[in-house]
Amino acid sequence: MPMTTAEIFDAMVQNVNPSAASGLNKTFQWNITGDDPGVYAIKLENGQAELIKGGVEKPDLTLTVSDKDWASIVEGKLDPTTAFMTGKIKISGDMMLAMRLQNLFNRPR
């Protein structure tokens, strides 16, 4: 059974890559559209992750993506770069931070 959007973000917080997150104090926000929409932020600080449902006022990076496309990216079925290049993900904020995102979270099992 596929994970819900909320379950995906809960799993992401539990699967932070500590070495990639070390020294990174930033907040990422996802505006999820589609059948299972929502706004989720993950604040990374000192290698720890905190999930903030409903988002924050000033994230360092915002991604807008459908629930189905985000699930496909998390599951490894859709390449994030391809998703960006084809307009499936819209990014605002720190683009260099967006490039680091892929290594910050281990794939949930």
Image: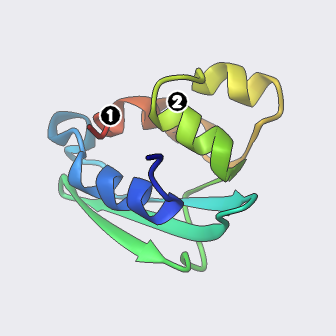
- Looking at the image, which residue is at 62% across and 70% down? 38
- Residue at the far front: name it: 1
> Which mark, by number, is residue 33?
none
Crowding at mark 2 (Cα within 10 Å: few <14, some 14-19, many 20+): few
Q: Position of residue 36 (x, y in %)?
A: 65, 64
- Looking at the image, which residue is at 35% across and 30% down? 103
Q: Nearer the viewer, residue 27 or 40?
A: 40
> Which mark, by number, is residue 107?
1
In the displayed structure image, the side of residue 83 where residue 106 appears, left or right: left
- Looking at the image, which residue is at 54% across and 42% down? 71
- Looking at the image, which residue is at 52% across and 30% down? 99
Asked where in the image residue 82 lies, by quadrant, the reply is: top right
Q: Image height check: is 57 above or below 5?
A: below
Q: Image height check: is 82 above or below 92?
A: above
Residue 96 makes an appearance in the image = no
Quick one: label 2 or label 1, which is nearer the N terminus?
2
Q: Nearer the viewer, residue 57 or 86?
A: 86
Identity of the amino acid at label 2?
Met
Q: Position of residue 101 (x, y in %)?
A: 45, 37
Q: How many marks?
A: 2
